[in-house]
Image (cartoon, rainbow, N blue to C red):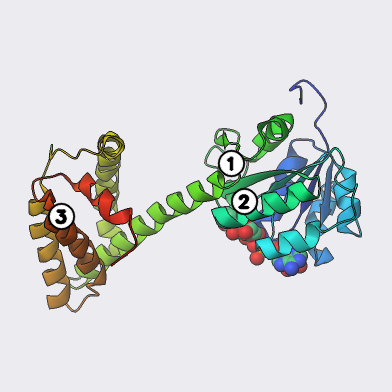
């Protein structure tokens, strides 16, 4: 277990793309002896100037530190890189911060277990400039003991937002996908709204502050609906699905009349139609969870 009063522990970073370089820079800035390896060696340049050590092979990089952080494009590359001789990973913990699905994470964990490799899965809910700031959120899953042994070092990447979730390797990627889905939902709705208002000459910059207010209001609905979803009961404490259905029809009609893409409002309306057909006209919006829990018809 790392003691916070100990000297910063050595760490290896494999993969020096935009994100990998930000990770390595954060470790270096916090005094960790940092070894790096990248397929294209040139990308290590600035990190070497800041004190990083570069190795000529992945194997040497793994042997250099007890904690090995991997951040490359995909899981195919992760497995290719970690396919090393038996014994290379003795007393090492590999933390994979490459984005993928929960199935890929679980498969890679099983693959790692066959090689005796202590493997922790992680996801980064941040862009490279936010690494090591209060805005960075990083979620981890996998063997807790392996994670805890290096938690203090990993905390450098997200001082306020480093969270251990569960022993199931698949859980952190599943959170990643669920949270990214929220981001895309908000962004697409904002862009749709900006397109609607654009037809009346309203600049997006004028729309933005009100859009932000609406996003914050909707964040309150999330808190209110979560216990309803868990309980499987959706009392209409604010508005019924029948009322939402009317509003969504207007949104679709407005979009079509103005020549704006109407697929989003039609998709939302269709979900509400299905929920109402299933007997939820008098329920609240959270009743739509039943539509999301099954594949589209
Ligand atoms: N950038 C972000 O905002 C962000 C945010 C959250 C999560 N992530 C995740 O972080 C990971 C890296 O993203 P990035 O932005 O750093 O991407 P990137 O700038 O495109 O870098 C990709 C890295 O993967 C390496 N790589 C790809 N295929 C390889 C292979 N077959 N063998 C060895 N190395 C290989 C590249 O090496 P070369 O330099 O030799 O090409 C490079 O180091 C991705 O999984 C991404 O989803 C990124």
Q: Which residue is more in the foreground, 215 or 182?
A: 182
Q: Position of residue 182 (x, y in %)?
A: 38, 52
Residue plotted at (67% across, 61% down): 75
Q: Position of residue 27 (x, y in %)?
A: 74, 41
Tell me where residue 37 sits by quadrant.
bottom right
- Give SS at disc 3: helix
Residue 98 in percent (x, y) is at 64, 55
Residue 122 vertical position relative to residue 196 in the rendered view, above or below: above
Q: Position of residue 80 (x, y in %)?
A: 77, 63
Task: Give me the C-alpha separation between circle 3 and circle 1.
Answer: 34 Å
- Would you place residue 249 above or below residue 32 in this image? below
Residue 84, picture quadrant: bottom right
* Residue identifier under label 3: 278
The image quadrant where one finds the C terminus is bottom left
Pointer 2 with pointer 1, Cβ within 8 A? yes
> Is 141 positioned to the left or the right of 26 in the image?
left
Q: Which residue is mark 2?
A: 106
For marks 3 and 1 on the same chain, the one whose residue lies earlier in the sequence: 1
- For residue 168, which numbered disc appears in the image? 1
On the question of residue 114 being in view, the answer is yes
Ligand number 1: quarter of image: bottom right
């Amino acid at each position: 277990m790392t003691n916070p009063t100990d000297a910063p522990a050595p760490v290896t970073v494999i993969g020096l793309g935009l994100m990998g370089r930000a990770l390595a820079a954060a470790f270096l800035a916090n005094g960790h002896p940092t070894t790096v390896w990248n397929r294209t060696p040139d990308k290590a340049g600035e990190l070497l100037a800041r004190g990083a050590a570069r190795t000529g092979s992945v194997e040497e990089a793994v042997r250099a530190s007890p904690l090995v952080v991997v951040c490359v494009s995909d899981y195919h590359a992760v497995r290719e890189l970690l396919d090393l001789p038996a014994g290379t990973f003795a007393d090492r913990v590999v933390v994979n911060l490459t984005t993928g699905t929960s199935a890929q994470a679980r498969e890679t964990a099983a693959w790692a277990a066959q090689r005796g490799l202590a493997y922790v899965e992680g996801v980064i809910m941040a862009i490279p400039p936010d690494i090591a700031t209060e805005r960075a959120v990083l979620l981890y899953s996998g063997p807790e003991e392996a994670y805890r042994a290096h938690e203090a070092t990993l905390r450098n990447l997200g001082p306020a937002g480093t969270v251990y979730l569960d022993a199931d390797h698949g859980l952190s990627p599943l959170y990643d996908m669920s949270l990214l889905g929220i981001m895309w939902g908000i962004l697409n709705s904002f862009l749709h709204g900006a397109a609607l208002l654009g037809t009346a000459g309203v600049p997006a910059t004028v729309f933005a502050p009100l859009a932000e207010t609406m996003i914050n209001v909707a964040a309150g609905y999330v808190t209110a609906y979560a216990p309803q979803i868990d309980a499987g009961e959706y009392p209409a404490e604010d508005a019924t699905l029948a009322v939402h259905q009317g509003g969504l029809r207007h949104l679709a009609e407005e979009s079509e009349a103005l020549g704006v893409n109407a697929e989003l409002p039609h998709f939302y309306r269709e979900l509400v139609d299905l929920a109402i057909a299933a007997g939820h006209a008098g329920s609240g919006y959270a009743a739509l969870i039943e539509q999301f829990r099954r594949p589209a018809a």
